Image (cartoon, grey):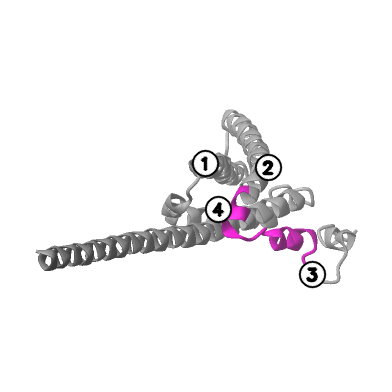
């Protein structure tokens, strides 16, 4: 009888060892899966933050340069318009890859990024629309066969289009002021400060002072 009891207890102990081992293996597999998922989400979030940070930093720099070039010569001359078109291309890249926002864990950061980008896109497109209208009207006004009434109407439309263009630019610059906050919010997620982008704006060529850099934008009399 004692032998049978001993065998039963021995079998029971072995069974508990098997159950305990299986539980440990299950928990270990679950923990490993969770850990792998965490690091994968973190990797994707960091890549998204790096990508978006690069785009927004470049966009911010371009708009800073645009504000500088607008003060030199023709406010909406070829250089200013080229800078604005470059900024639009950066926004096109963002729009093609907007799903990267999903990888950012902070919903508030996602909402801020998208809302500021929309506030930049609207006035930027407004500038291009107004510029196209202005060029069309200026071409019309160069004609020698216009009646006085048509010429007067065209001049009024030209003045309105110029006001729209200037107002759109002012709103664009106001919206662009919020880009720095987005860069600061993305920096800890990306593990990078993006300071190099701002340094390039302040000092585009190594060895140049800020005053020398600014002087490159000033025309020679």
Cα distance in 3D space between marks 4 and 3: 25 Å
| Mark carried by residue 88 | 4
* Helix, strand or loop at mark 1: helix
Residue furthest out toward the bottom: 207
Nearer to us in this view, 39 or 20: 20
Q: Position of residue 33 (x, y in %)?
A: 35, 62
For mark 2, what is the residue? Answer: 177
Residue under the point 55% across and 53% down: 88
Residue 117 in sight here: yes
Q: Residues within 10 Å of mark 2 (few under 14, many from 20)?
A: some
Cα distance in 3D space between marks 2 and 3: 24 Å
Q: Mark 4 touching mark 3, by CB under 8 A?
A: no
Q: Earlier in the sequence, mark 2 or mark 4?
A: 4
Q: Earlier in the sequence, mark 1 or mark 3?
A: 1
For mark 3, what is the residue? Answer: 205
Q: Position of residue 220 (x, y in %)?
A: 88, 61
Range covered by the magenta-colored residues? 185-205
Seen in the image, is 99 located left or right of residue 24? right
Q: Position of residue 147 (x, y in %)?
A: 58, 33
For mark 1, what is the residue? Answer: 118
């Amino acid at each position: 009888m004692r032998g049978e009891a001993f065998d039963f207890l021995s079998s029971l102990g072995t069974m508990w060892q098997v159950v305990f081992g299986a539980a440990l293996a299950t928990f270990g597999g679950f923990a490993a899966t969770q850990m792998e998922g965490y690091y994968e989400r973190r990797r994707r979030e960091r890549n998204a933050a790096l990508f978006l940070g690069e785009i927004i930093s470049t966009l911010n720099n371009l708009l800073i340069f645009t504000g500088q070039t607008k003060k030199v010569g023709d406010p909406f001359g070829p250089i200013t318009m080229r800078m604005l078109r470059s900024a639009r291309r950066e926004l096109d890249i963002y729009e093609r890859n907007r799903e990267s926002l999903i990888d950012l864990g902070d919903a508030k950061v996602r909402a801020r990024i998208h809302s500021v980008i929309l506030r930049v896109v609207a006035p930027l497109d407004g500038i291009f629309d107004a510029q196209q209208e202005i060029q069309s009207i200026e071409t019309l006004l160069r004609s020698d066969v216009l009646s006085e009434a048509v010429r007067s109407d065209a001049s009024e439309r030209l003045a309105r289009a110029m006001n729209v263009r200037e107002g759109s630019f002012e709103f664009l610059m106001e919206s662009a002021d919020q880009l720095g906050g987005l860069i600061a919010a993305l920096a800890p997620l990306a593990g990078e400060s993006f300071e190099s982008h701002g340094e390039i704006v302040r000092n585009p060529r190594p060895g140049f002072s800020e005053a020398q850099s600014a002087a490159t934008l000033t025309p020679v009399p």
